[in-house]
Image: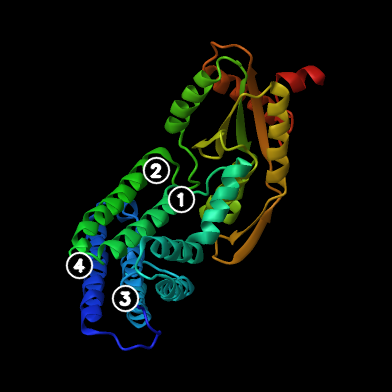
Amino acid sequence: MDTGGIFTPVAWGAGQTALALLLCGLAQAEFARYQARRAVRPVDTPWVSTVAVWIMGAALTLPPAAVLAVAAVLHAHELFRGPPRQLGSALVSTFAATLASLVSSGDARTGVLAGLLYLAATDGPALLRGAWRLVAGAHPVVGRRGAAGDGVTLVALGVMLGLSMHFSPLAILFVLLPVSYLRRSAHGRALRHAAAHDPKTQLWNHAAWQTLSSAALASHRTRARSAVLMVDLDHFKRLNDTYGHRAGDDVLGSVAHVLQNTTRRNDIVARIGGEEFSILLPGVTEQEACQAAERIRDQIAALTVTTTNLHGHPTVINGITASIGVAATHRADTSVDDLLVNADRWLYQAKERGRNRVCGPLLAAAA
């Protein structure tokens, strides 16, 4: 298909196609808002922007002027009617869609290339960060599980829509179902996430940690090496009384970030209540567990948390410390509960010995 220049007048047929794509995109967005309003807990209904489907469909079937119009209208509607969104990302998406329309000539090869170009411009940095965290063995970014996959799926649906519309405009009807399913899938993920995660830190909650840790411990029976760390923030009640609960929540979030960044991807980190955290380290010796605990203690002690105090004034909190108990096993029949009880016992030893320290059998023997 001859795309022409960016300012080439849009033919009547192209105008009809652009209108159909716009109506579908706007209807999908409004239906999502309606579902969000009807939700019992609106936070459980995440916003999944589907504009990439209709924009890519336009990029592969319409001249650049029409693509620019479709992208501008859909993004403007999303900015005014959807949740808060950065204007910069909308401008990048509009520019990328226009560029993709110049690359595509209507065949499968250039269509896929246009889709990859649009994906690289809009989601490229996030995909690269996710790939780096995967290679580095780091935990996924909280709240981003499945989000990158949604972006790829939406662009792929858009490419499929654009290529199919060269044969029949009715192809647009067959994309409505998978797009709606993608929204429902995101809603289901959000519900499962809320059921298994602590709302303040987004770490695993106690029940999920017990289930996951039991399964992880069973999978390491052949090596029979695992450890549990119990981390408790020192004088946390005093901090809450001094600065307020909002500041306390900010401290908890910062500590959760430290725990995620100083543990491996397969380590299981949870907030089990109050200011207490538990971490399962599968496949480690007691010495390695003690070293990991010391790294965590050092990172927490180095924290500087910018927050607000009881009067709503900006304040900085530092000097945060934690006591950590370590329990390791070399037996195949040790349960998670056994490890948790032992780690809790060594945690109390750390408290009694002055706080801001790591305690465990290996360290006690060396003392």
Query: Is residue 92 placed above or below 242 in the rendered structure?
Result: below
The numbered disc on residue 143 is: 1
Local crowd size for mark 2, using a 10 Å CA cut-off: few (<14), some (14–19), many (≥20): some
**In the rendered image, which residue does mark 4 sit on?**
169
Residue at 35% from the left image edge and 88% from the top image edge:
8
Toward the viewer: 342 or 69?
A: 69
* Numbered tag placed on residue 62 in the rendering: 3
- Return the disc, 1 or 3, that comes first in the chain's sequence: 3
Kindly report the distance in space between the C-alpha atoms of the residues bearing marks 2 and 3. Answer: 40 Å
- Badge 3 marks a residue whose secondary structure is loop
- In the rendered image, which quarter is residue 36 located in? bottom left
Q: Amino acid at mark 4?
A: Pro
Going from N to C along the chain, the mark reached first, 3 or 4, is 3
User: Which mark's residue is nearer the viewer, 2 or 3?
Assistant: 3
C-beta proximity under 8 Å, tags 1 and 3: no
Which residue has dot 2 on it?
193
In x, y percent, where is residue 239?
61, 49
